[in-house]
Image: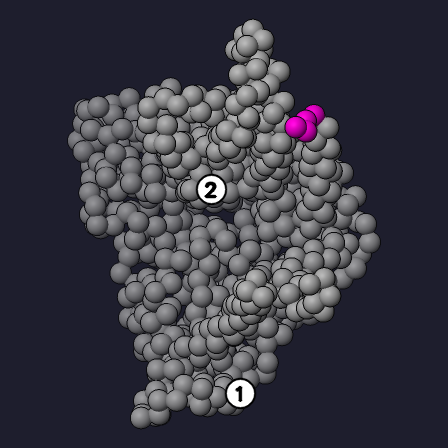
Amino acid sequence: MKKKLISALLAAAIAVTMATGCGTEKNEDNTNNNNAAQEGNEASNAGEKNETENAGEQDKTADAEGSVYYLNFKPEQAEQWKDLAEEYSNETGIPVTIETAAAGTYESTLKSEMAKEQAPTLFQVNGPAGLASWKDYCYDLKDSAVYKNLKSDDFALINDAGEVQAVAYVIETYGLIYNHDILSDYFEMDGAKIKDVSEINSFAKLKEVADDMQARKEELGIDGVFAPAGMDSSSDWRFKTHLANLPIYFEYKDDDLDTTDAIKGTYLDAYKNIWDLYITDSTIEPSMLSGITGEDAAAEFSMGNAVFYQNGTWAYGDIAGNDVDDEDMGMLPIYIGVGDEANQGLCTGSENYWCVNKNASKEDINATLDFLEWVITSDKGRQSFRDEMGFVTPFSTFTEEYQPENPLVKASNEYIDAGKTSIPWVFSTIPSEDWKNAVGSALLEYAQGTGDWEAVKKAFVEGWASEYKAVNE
Amino acid sequence: MQHSLKKYFPVFVLPTLAAFTIGFIIPFLMGIYLSFCKFTTVTDAKFIGIGNYLKILSDDAFGHALWYTAAFTIMSVLLINVLAFSVAMLLTKGIRGTNVFRTVFFMPNLIGGIVLGYVWQLLLNGVLAKFQKTLTYSSAYGFWGLVILMCWQQIGYMMIIYISGIQNIPGELIEAAKIDGARPVQILRNVTIPMVMPSITICTFLTLTNGFKLFDQNLALTNGEPSNMSELLALNIFNTFYGRTGYEGVGQAKAVVFFILVALIAVIQTRLTRTKEVQH
């Protein structure tokens, strides 16, 4: 009898745990969705302490005006987006939920979030290649404020049917960031190859200077000329994607293409030359490259141990505030010894595009479009972009006073003002992530001495054709 | 009693059955269905037949991951069991501080795989840096790194199982063997090992399946670098599913193949070691 009682109690306990388990989850969902609205509503519901009733009312508001759920790609701006969303909710009463995927997990997070009932209404793709898997989820942004305020159609992804599927919201620029302080020390040395940064205007000159500086690194008090070309996944995209952009761009330019199903690899020798330079005149041995992270490389530059560091305007936050003063930071084009080097500019483009989820309810879609309009037109939105997120945007609403204070952005604007030809980000036409990974691995093995350059060529040329086929079948 | 058990059977079983259905059976069946589909999110899948399975055959990375995993599993099963058994033998001899040693050996098992992976990455990279190398320099470094890590983590756990097995051997058996003039090696071979065979079955089963299913440690230690050469099966499946556009179905198909493989090996292994167990 006693045993029976105990078993019954145990069974009851399990049942109760399960019931509460499910119950709690549901509640949580509710609070999550209405989190942002809660604060706004709490004021109007002053004195109203009954939570259930409160939640019910919020649901009604949500039904009437829709809600926004943004799955943000950039972890470095996660907090700023949350603040901005709260601001908007306070103003309008529309709940805005911001979730940010951890670095490198955006695609997997998006995949699982999109399968949920409460799917993101606003998400991001990284360009045409990323759009390929999400094209069936994109709402046509043709009539939206974000599209109408774009400075140029170059910043939107438009399909063959003329639907605007994605709109870029931040423009970024990369090149060779340099430390002017160390360079000026070098200019004063006997037998310096050049006396001013502007004299570096070709790959030949860059190599001459880098080799000379590397030979005198003790005198200059540096560990090497180039910050290490780390091939950890936090840093390898600088080479397998950003550096690879240059040979691809010059080949497209020769053949007058925008994209291709088979690359020829015309300028792979130039790619090899610049890669050799990076790994030879480096602060560390090539055999160490596989473990070097993005932070390691940024640290070498910002502590003044290296002169050059290939990265872009977004890296300012990582390298500012240490040994290198803002006025000593500058950016050079990445010369690889191809094309009209005297007029070569920096690499400018975007890999952050907004897409609105077509499968969301009508109210949610409208709420999302309103939210985006508010972000790019209101003072608060624009100030946040300028001061806190430090974005340069392609929107015409961001006039002169809304440009961020970032020496790297200034450097990039100088090149544009000087009439140099910016290089677009054609790497967004790379067929797949697998192509990048294969090229990155081959680059690393070549650098370590465990593979040869032929493997890079194979991954670059044959890999392109096979990946293009695999993705587009 | 029998009667009331029958009567209340559904009441007792229902909660567990419901949880098992929601948490295991439904996802499992859905997974099998999805392996025949093309999809981006799991809620809108399109049936395409066995295309996904055909793609596995032409996937070199999967083949490599398969034998790399097999090699890793063999090595870790052997090392973990031999070492765990030796430690268990030592710690049942009644030496001073036995309990302290047992606790110390068991502790690594309480730390999660991801954390261990990162800790060992730092440790091993620190050592390798002396030779101007890193853990991801070649897949051999990653392989031995993983083996060391898994040994460190699992020996303590298996040791506990072996200790309980050894302690359960009736003292008179050993005593009888001694009186018959058996040397220690003979006692080990003819008395101890046959008597702990049930423990050996459990331990080989656990290490074998753990080795095949290993994911966290692999992800944290090398993440498959270089060139996916140190990628174990589970990580390969994960990367196929999440890393490649349009390959979600292939990843799912790989997962089904993986399940069949692990189930098959586990069944064969338990059959084999079971036959060696003795009754007393």
Quadrant position of residue A188 = top left
* Residue A61 makes an appearance in the image: no
Majority SS type along the magenta span: loop
Of the residues tagged 2 and 1, which is closer to the observer? 2
Quadrant position of residue A36 = bottom left
* Residue pointed to by mark 1: A63
Q: Residue at x 59, y 76 (%)?
A: A360
The answer to whether B155 appears left or right of A433 in the picture is: left
Q: Residue at x 68, y 46 (%)?
A: B255
Relative to A441, does residue A322 appear above or below in the rendering?
below
Q: Badge 1: few (under 14), some or many (20 or more) residues near its Cα, within 10 Å?
A: few
Nearer to me, B152 or A425 = B152
Q: Chain of mark 1?
A: A
Q: Which residues are magenta?
A: B276-280
Quadrant position of residue A287 = top left
Image location of residue B173, percent across then percent down: 57, 20
Q: Amino acid at mark 1?
A: Asp
Q: Amino acid at mark 2?
A: Gly
Q: Badge 2: few (under 14), some or many (20 or more) residues near its Cα, within 10 Å?
A: many
Nearer to me, A62 or B69 = B69
* Residue A218 makes an appearance in the image: yes
- The residues tagged by marks 2 and 1 sit, at their Cα atoms, a distance apart of 44 Å
Image disc number at residue B113: 2
Secondary structure, mark 1, is helix
Indicate yes or no whether the magenta region holds residue A171: no
Image location of residue A91, percent across then percent down: 35, 85
Image location of residue A359, percent across then percent down: 62, 74
Q: Residue at x 65, y 59 (%)?
A: B20
Q: Are marks 2 and 1 in contact (CB under 8 Å)?
A: no
